[in-house]
Amino acid sequence: MNDKAPPIENLRIIKVATCPSLSRASQITYHLALKEDDEQVYLRIAGNSGGGLFAKECVALDAIITAIQDQGDQPITGKTLRPLFRGKSANTPGFALAVARDLGLIVARPGTDGGYQGGNAQRCREAIAALIAAGTAIPVADPVNGRHVPMAKRATAAPAPARRG
């Protein structure tokens, strides 16, 4: 697995979905994307209806699954994923954990007031494999300079002119 994830423009989007944040106060939009040459799947947080900041970098889904599985019997919290987002927005690990819950990678710990435990990673991998086998490729637009630009064009979009006050 590469330490540096490829830019989203170089990946095939296989899933776009929205899920509630851990607090259920906002909706998190995310992308799952495939890097064709090594069939690595990446997660990218793409939006938050609550306005909290987040990093848009891609993180390998296998790294998230490994971090969850490495917790063993310990509760899984946003801190579990923090090492994957070092130097990024403090919100991003919690948002990624909300996505993990949506994907079934974690479930609420029974009989506790907080934290999660590992879910069914195999079922998640099978669902992703089905999307890949079906050739799923979702065109995604991302706001650049206040307008929607297809992801493939995003890197070449001209910067917005400076506003005069």
Image: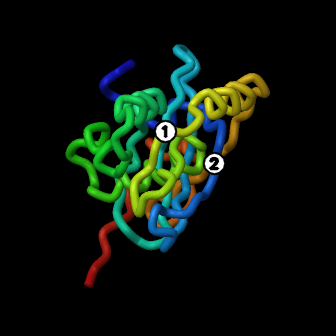
Left or right of 143? Residue 103 is right
Confirm or deny contact between disc 2 and disc 1 (CB under 8 A): no
Image position, residue 153 (x, y; %): 53, 43
Vertical relation: 12 (above or below) 133: below
Q: Which image quarter is the C terminus in?
A: bottom left
Vertical relation: 162 (above or below) 108: below
Left or right of 45? Residue 120 is right
Residue 9 in view here: yes
Image position, residue 9 (x, y; %): 51, 37
Image quadrant where residue 39 sits: top right
Q: Which mark is residue 118?
A: 1
SS category of the residue bearing label 1: strand
Vertical relation: 78 (above or below) 71: below
Q: Which residue is most to the right?
A: 134
Image position, residue 7 (x, y; %): 43, 35
Give the residue type that dot 2 points to: Val
Image position, residue 151 (x, y; %): 55, 44
Q: Which mark is residue 16?
A: 2
Q: Nearer the viewer, residue 89 or 77?
A: 77
Q: Which mark is residue 141?
A: none
Q: Which image quarter is the N terminus in?
A: top left
* Residue plotted at (37% across, 68% down): 52
SS category of the residue bearing label 2: strand
* Mark closer to the chain start, 2 or 1: 2
Give the residue type that dot 1 points to: Gly
Q: CA distance from mark 2 to mark 1?
A: 23 Å
